[in-house]
Image (tube, grey):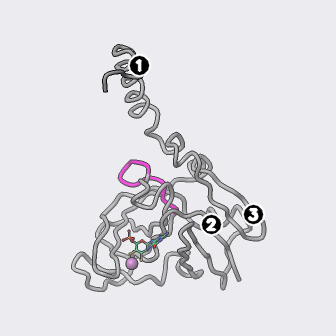
Amino acid sequence: MSRTFLPGGMAVVATAILLFSIVAGCSTPAQDPLAAKWRVTVNGTTEKVLSIKDLEAFPAVNGHGYCVSTTGFRFGPYRCKGVDLRDIAATVGGIHPGQKVWVSAPDGYLWVFDYDQVEGRGFITFDENLRELPPPPLRIILMYEQDGKPVSYDDGGPARIAIISEKPGVITEGSAWVKWVDRIEIRD
Ligand SMILES: Nc1nc2c(c(=O)[nH]1)N[C@H]1C(S)=C(S)[C@@H](COP(=O)(O)O)O[C@H]1N2
Ligand SMILES: [Mo]
């Protein structure tokens, strides 16, 4: 490389500006390029399209999330922040007894929650040793922050399903933690 694109001094300044914008500008979910483009379509009796900014305007729910894959690999524990699925459903007519919520992602993955689960009941839970635990009250959230940071793409961000509890150490099945959520449907 005998010739550079920018004179040395300008390259240093450009790098400094770039680094500054990464540190200062892109740390909140809505400003992250992936998060800025992300939308979820919510379908019930009406339809709404929500952005991360829209999610941030809902009442925020915080809790402990911890899941395990079918192969026994554990993800977490995490501090999870997001929006209760019931609050999201409420914007398109709500969810009523007997209905189900279909949550899907661009890779074709789909998970269905029944009404009881949306109310936080009927999940199988485990303790740290993967022994089944009487399930405490749980909440399903569409999580946009994990451990105080935007959810990374690798972790299923910008928005992923998390099943959370008030106290830590409650493990749920990873298959329900839909990554890269882009569609939520309330169905009979
Ligand atoms: N969109 C999407 N979400 C998904 C999956 C998937 O394949 N696609 N796999 C699920 C399963 S089975 C598990 S155990 C957890 C963690 O899966 P990972 O090991 O692929 O991260 O994510 C869940 N969410
Ligand atoms: Mo899994």
Q: Amino acid at mark 2?
A: Arg
Q: Nearer the viewer, mark 2 or mark 1?
A: 1
Quadrant for the C terminus in the image: bottom right
- Residue beneath the point at 55% across and 76% down: 110
Q: Is residue 173 visible?
A: no
Q: Earlier in the sequence, mark 3 or mark 2?
A: 3
Read off the magenta span.
142-150
Q: Amino acid at mark 1?
A: Leu
Of the pair 179 and 164, the residue shown nearer to us = 179
59 in magenta:
no
Q: Nearer the viewer, mark 1 or mark 3?
A: 1
Element at badge 2?
strand
Q: Earlier in the sequence, mark 1 or mark 3?
A: 1
Q: Position of residue 102 (x, y in %)?
A: 61, 76
Element at badge 3?
strand
Q: Is residue 96 visible?
A: yes
Of the pair 34 and 188, the residue shown nearer to us = 34
Q: Residues within 10 Å of mark 2 (few under 14, many from 20)?
A: some
Q: Which mark is residue 6?
A: 1
Q: Count the marks: how many?
A: 3
* Left or right of residue 175, residue 88 in this image: right
Mark 1–mark 3 Cα distance, whole angstroms, equals 49 Å
Q: Position of residue 95 (x, y in %)?
A: 67, 74
Element at badge 1?
loop
Q: Position of residue 177 (x, y in %)?
A: 45, 71
Q: Amino acid at mark 3?
A: Glu
Does residue 180 sit above or below 51 in this rendering? below
